[in-house]
Image: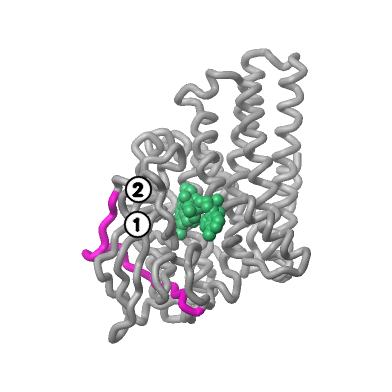
């Protein structure tokens, strides 16, 4: 399998990290996942374990006490493989973990030395967790009674953020959030209408009394353990020392693009877990002589193998400094991986039958989680963005806006 050849490319330190992530995922995280899913709660115990294992600093530079992985650190494949291991146990945990690691990458790339010193030491030593929140969809869903959106106003010594955000992953669990907000009005980064220069990244201490988590909105089919609640900001003051980078830098430098293949790593985890589950299931039921099951297992294995090849391909671009190429290649990988993962999960269900969708089957949760998670970006627009880039048309490589 390609997994074996991917593993063979890792040095002993990288291999040890991935192995440590796998042990944690298999021995601790997998058994907690059904509870977090049912109750739609943040996987707090998992993050305590991640801290105790020294993994919260995985994407923190070594000079600040971390493990130094990341797309701009020339070492990203082990990070994605760790994410894949967590996704095999719990896709919601993987999303919270991605949010934390991506925040570390942003602070490393755009933060000042003083900010890095202040925030990284608290992550590494005190187990503080981070996430990045943009989500302010501007068109209201038919069932929604409130609109989403923040306003961000300049005041003496900082900014005041007022309003609410939805899809705030790790709400109630994370200690800090990087708020992607616009001085031009509501919309965050993804749905913003103003000029790119109006976009700010503000580090927000979530223990501030002006911030409230509203858990009444988040009751989705899947990804329930991400606790992606609505968060309300009641004139929250954010001091200048918490501004990350310069206005518009996030979009101008395409920072979102290095996180897009990270989603693909999580989708690969879903595919690999579904495939392994199906293989064990049909073996245990002695159904391996069925030619259709043979097809499903064969195709699923090829899907997983293809996923590894794509991740490896994109990781090599980041790791060898071919960042321009890597930016859109990551979207291609994410596009391919969405289809491979959904196909693998559906084939696994066909091979195993109805009881594989009866709780506590992991396949049942993966099916629900993946259905929601792939909606994080619209793949129709993502594919159109790749087409536009090939035809020399203007395109948005970060959020694939139509
Ligand atoms: C599990 C999960 C976790 C998430 N975590 C985070 C997080 O931590 N931080 C964060 O910032 N965000 C997060 N998101 C939110 C995500 O970034 C999106 O904002 C969210 O999924 C958008 O919701 P929507 O698809 O209902 O809304 P919409 O944005 O309304 O999209 C609905 C559809 O309309 C299309 N559309 C949008 N605008 C237009 C237009 N102008 N013209 C034509 N079509 C359009 C979209 O492409 C899409 O197909 C998360 C999402 C999920 C599913």
Give the percent coordinates (x, y) of residue 317: 73, 64
From the viewer's perspective, is residue 179 above or below residue 28? below
Q: Position of residue 340 (x, y in %)?
A: 68, 41
Q: Specify whether residue 116 is in view.
A: no
Q: Which residues are magenta?
A: 197-214
Which residue: 52% across, 24% down?
Answer: 357
**How many labels sit on residues?**
2
Classify residue 45 by image quadrant.
top left
Q: Is residue 361 above or below residue 45?
A: above
Q: Main secondary structure of the magenta part?
A: strand
Does the magenta run of residues contain 209? Answer: yes
| Labels 1 & 2 near each other (Cβ < 8 A) | yes
Could you tell me residue 242's position as x and y percent?
Answer: 37, 76
Q: Residues within 10 Å of mark 1 (few under 14, many from 20)?
A: some
Q: Nearer the viewer, residue 326 or 190?
A: 190
Mark 1 to mark 2: distance in Å?
7 Å
**Mark 2 residue CB less than 8 A from any atom of ligand 1:** no
Q: Residue at x 76, y 29 (%)?
A: 298
Q: Nearer the viewer, residue 97 or 347?
A: 347
Q: Quadrant of the C terminus?
A: bottom right
Describe the colour scheme in one phrase: one colour
Quarter in which the N terminus is drawn: top right
Per the image, the residue denoted by label 2 is 144
Disc 2: CA contacts within 10 A as few (<14), some (14-19) or many (>=20): few
Q: Would residue 400 be counted in the magenta stretch? A: no
Which residue is most to the bottom?
156
- Per the image, the residue denoted by label 1 is 147
Q: Which element carries disc 1, helix, strand or loop?
A: loop
- Closer to the camera, 144 or 72? 144
Does dot 2 land on a helix, a strand or a loop? loop
Q: Which mark is residue 352?
A: none
């Amino acid at each position: 399998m390609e997994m074996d050849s991917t593993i063979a490319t890792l040095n002993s330190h990288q291999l040890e990290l991935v192995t440590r992530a796998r042990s944690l995922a298999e021995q601790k995280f997998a058994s907690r996942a059904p509870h977090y899913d049912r109750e739609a709660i943040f996987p707090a115990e998992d993050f305590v374990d991640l801290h105790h294992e020294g993994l919260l600093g995985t994407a923190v530079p070594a000079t600040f006490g971390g493990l130094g992985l990341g797309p701009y650190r020339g070492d990203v494949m082990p990070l994605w493989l760790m994410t894949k291991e967590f996704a095999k146990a719990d896709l919601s945990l993987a999303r919270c973990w991605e949010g934390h690691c991506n925040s570390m990458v942003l602070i490393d790339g755009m933060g000042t030395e003083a900010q890095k010193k202040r925030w990284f030491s608290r992550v590494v030593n005190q187990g503080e967790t981070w996430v990045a929140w943009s989500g302010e969809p501007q068109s209201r869903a038919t069932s929604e009674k409130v609109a989403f959106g923040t306003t961000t106003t300049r005041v003496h010594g900082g900014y005041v953020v007022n309003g609410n955000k939805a899809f705030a992953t790790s709400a109630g669990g994370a200690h800090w959030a990087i708020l992607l907000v616009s001085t031009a009005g509501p919309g965050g980064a993804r749905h913003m209408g103003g000029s790119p220069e109006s976009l700010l990244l503000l580090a927000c201490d979530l223990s501030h009394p002006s911030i409230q988590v509203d858990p009444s909105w988040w009751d989705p089919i899947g990804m329930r353990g991400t606790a992606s609640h609505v968060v309300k900001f009641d004139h929250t003051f954010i001091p200048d020392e918490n501004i990350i980078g310069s206005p518009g830098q996030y979009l101008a430098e395409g920072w979102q693009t290095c996180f897009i293949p990270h989603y693909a790593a999580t989708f690969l985890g879903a595919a690999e877990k579904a495939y392994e589950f199906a293989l064990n299931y049909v073996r245990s039921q002695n159904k391996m002589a069925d030619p259709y099951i043979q097809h499903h297992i064969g195709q699923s294995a090829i899907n997983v193998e293809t996923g590894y090849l794509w991740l490896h391909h994109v990781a090599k671009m980041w790791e060898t400094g071919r960042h321009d190429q890597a930016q859109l290649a990551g979207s291609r990988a994410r596009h391919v991986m969405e289809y491979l993962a959904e196909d693998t999960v559906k084939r696994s269900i066909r091979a195993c039958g109805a009881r594989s969708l009866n709780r506590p089957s992991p396949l049942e949760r993966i099916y629900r989680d993946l259905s929601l998670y792939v909606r994080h970006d619209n793949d129709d627009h993502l594919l159109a963005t790749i087409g536009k880039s090939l035809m020399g048309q203007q395109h948005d490589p970060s959020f694939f806006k139509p």
